Amino acid sequence: MIDPQLADLRKTYAQRTLAEADVLPDAMHQFRQWLEEALAAKLDEPTAFTLSTVSDTGQPSSRVVLLKGLPDDIGFLFYTNYESRKGRELTAQPLAAINFFWPGLERQVRVEGQVEKAPEEMSTEYFQSRPRSSQLGAWASPQSQIIGSREELVAREAAMATEFGAQDPLPRPAHWGGFILRPHRMEFWQGRPSRLHDRIVYELNGTTWHRSRLAP
């Protein structure tokens, strides 16, 4: 049964075009250009992306996380609790896909690649740059584990605040740190009328990116 309230929701994308001549030879440089345009447009949460991982049984799962860097233009940096569901899945199956969606620019970027843990010094430097409340939260939250109540979580945070006293910054927990996704495939998607969207895909062969156009 079709729900007309949903089925009739449509938007025509017509802001921009995307031709092979419009994109840079290097996929990461092209991403940085689009990210700078998203930041300049003052979009809501321009660094947010959907991260998809897979379990050892093949069950995929997705969640939204925030981009925290493009180290040396080799990959996408984000942080998490290594003992969370995504942390455990990325450790066991170090392949992932991410997707940026910028509706204000009618654009998407789809990325697939290999994941590795960020260097410890990079994770520590970022952790200690966060607000102290966020540092305490990383110590207090057993991320992705079942807890009895919100009050239990608040109590854990209070206990951590008491334990560390006036110490600032806090030490980084061993279970918390960064991942870097090194892409081998990146697609730049620009919305167009009649659902005939522009799609330019980059695929990495050795150290060289090869570009192709995909049908929408």
Image (cartoon, rainbow, N blue to C red):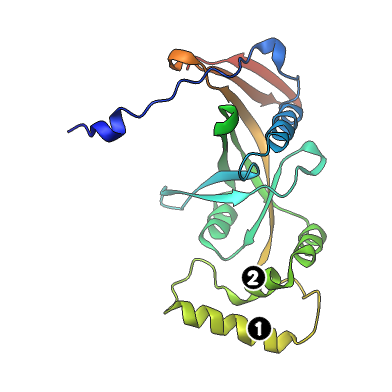
| Residue type for callout 1 | Met
Nearest the camera: 131 or 206?
131
Q: Is residue 96 above or below residue 83?
A: above
Q: In this view, does 16 lie above or below 164?
A: above
Nearest the camera: 162 or 205?
162
Element class at badge 2: helix
Q: Neighbour class for label 2 at 10 Å: few (<14), some, many (≥20)?
A: many
Where is residue 145 drawn, in percent x and y? Answer: 48, 70
Examine the rendering and report whether any part of residue 196 can be seen.
no
Please name the residue shown 57% across and 24% down the image.
189
Where is residue 173 drawn, in percent x and y? Answer: 70, 72
Q: Do the residues labelled 1 and 2 touch (CB within 8 Å)?
A: no
Q: In which quarter of the image is residue 29?
A: top right
Element class at badge 1: helix
Please name the residue shown 65% across and 23% down the image.
202
Location of mark 2 (residue): 138
| Residue type for callout 2 | Ala
Q: In this view, does 98 lie above or below 121?
A: above
**Circle nearer the N terminus (1, 2):** 2
Say left or right for 4 vs 107: left
Say left or right for 39 vs 98: right
Location of mark 1 (residue): 160
Where is residue 101 drawn, in percent x and y? Answer: 56, 36
Rounded to the nearest angstrom, the CA distance separating label 1 from label 2 is 10 Å
Question: Where the N terminus falls, by quadrant?
Answer: top left
Q: In this view, does 147 lie above or below 191?
A: below
